[in-house]
Amino acid sequence: MIARAYTVAFEGVEARHVEVQCAVTPGVPAFSLVGLPDKAVSEARDRVRTALTSMAIALPSKRITVNLSPADLPKEGSHFDLPIALALLAALDIIPKDAIEGTTSLGELSLDGTLMPVIGALPAAMAAAEEDRTLLCPKASGAEAAWVGAAHVIGAATLADVVRHYTGQSPLAPAEPGEVTTPPLGRDLRDVKGQERAKRALEIAAAGRHHLMMLGTPGSGKSMLAARLPGILPQLSAREALETSMIHSLAGLLDEGGISRTRPFREPHHTASMAAIVGGGRRASPGEISLAHNGVLFMDEFPEFSRTVLETLRQPIETGEVMIARANAHVTYPCRFMLIAAANPCKCGYLSDPARACARAPACGDDYLGRISGPLMDRFDLRIEVPPVAFSDLDLPSSGDSSAEVAGRVAEAQAVQAARYAEAPGTHLNSDAEGAVLAQVATPDAEGRALLTRMSERFGLSARGYHRVLRVARTIADLDGSDEVRRPHVAEAASYRITNAKET
């Protein structure tokens, strides 16, 4: 008779259900594992056999066959250990077969029967809840999975605890959600001396989730400004926190099951590979752009990144998702992030300073920024130049609004946008608006329309650039508390578009 247990296989953030079938039949003693397992899954045979031996359970001298169905779905990871062990225990009549029918399980077994934590407990709990199943996982992963309120989650420390649970000797208690992590307060925007225009651009970018490019000499404060961006962003909503945490769960980044309401802030080094930035590798893992989902991706020294990496960003910026194509599967990850890029004006960094610029100025600036293609540069909603700060300004006391004050205005602007787009599927902030929705909410008044037309003709804005100016103008109007997009809003939005940066 065949015993069945249930688990999941991961395809991106989607957890696909897998049925683990186990049959113990007469024949030459063997332990066969079929169903397209990878190396880690195939090694489960030895881990399960040794773990059972540590519990004084000897396998019979029969043929044991375990099938992972559907057989054409690739199975990867060590989390198949526990469901294989459950199916085998049920086939040996050590635990009741019907007891595991309503359970989805995952977990890695050590040789002494201890259950080790695995990645993906949160999306697995989501899949179990959709099928109205209980999730059984290692105790260390239970706090993470328990955040899915619709799922009944139990965590076990050892395989022996699982056996006692299913035989009624010592039932396991439901797992409790981990604590919501609250990182220490970030750096204050008031610490930045001068750079009022850059602070204003940062506020606009945060309010509407607009992409921002900062150009400036070394030491002008670009990285300092970007580091203070998390302090002015509102916390993740419950939906956003769950979306983001599912990706971080697959990457193994959730700390003891705690889910953070702080928006992600990822800052990869410019030597990072395309697989690290976009995603990929042997298991098609999420990259930095997906780990920054609902948050910020800060790319310092932007032109120094590989040209292939930069060009690959173009589609995810527009669509909010990235597809990783492999020979046996296509995995899609969400990646709706705010891109903050920083760059020097040239290789030496001092193009605007005749006393310090290299002998190749100004040609070195064109060559350096020429690494950023026109279509990619066109996708930045705001482009600002960050001038060097005078030494006299560094001795002045801190001035301007604090991060808390700016965060209050950003939160109010985003609340207005949330109410505006409540009936527009897929649109949450002004940067998402397009087509008829954008025309309805961001069409400027007559003076603003005339100004935008003149600037488009004079500076040759692309159609994409035209619409991005409208989105930024709508955000500026929201920060201003205006229901209508007026000429001053359009003028300020266009001023962030027309710079000395490389134009399309």
Image (cartoon, grey):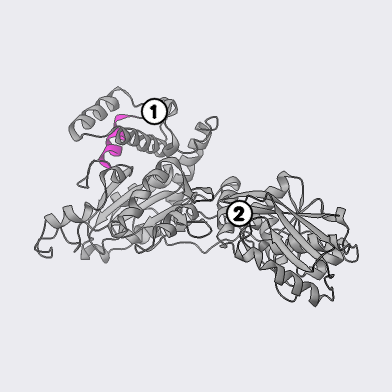
- Location of the C terminus by quadrant is top left
Picture coordinates of residue 403, whole percent (x, y): 43, 55
| Res 115 visible | no
Q: Which mark is residue 484?
A: 1
| Res 407 visible | yes
Give yes or no for residue 488 being in the magenta stretch: yes
Q: Mark 2 packing: few (<14 Cα in 10 Å), some, or many (20+)?
A: some
What are the residue bounds of the magenta stretch?
A: 484-497
Give yes or no for residue 468 being in the magenta stretch: no
Q: As rendered, which of 499 and 127 lies closer to the eye?
A: 127
Secondary structure of residue under mark 1: loop
| Residue drawn at point x = 74 percent, y = 50 percent | 151
Tell me: residue 190, above or below residue 435.
Answer: below
Q: Mark 1 packing: few (<14 Cα in 10 Å), some, or many (20+)?
A: some
Residue named by callout 2? 74
**Tally of numbered tags:** 2
Picture coordinates of residue 241, whole percent (x, y): 58, 51
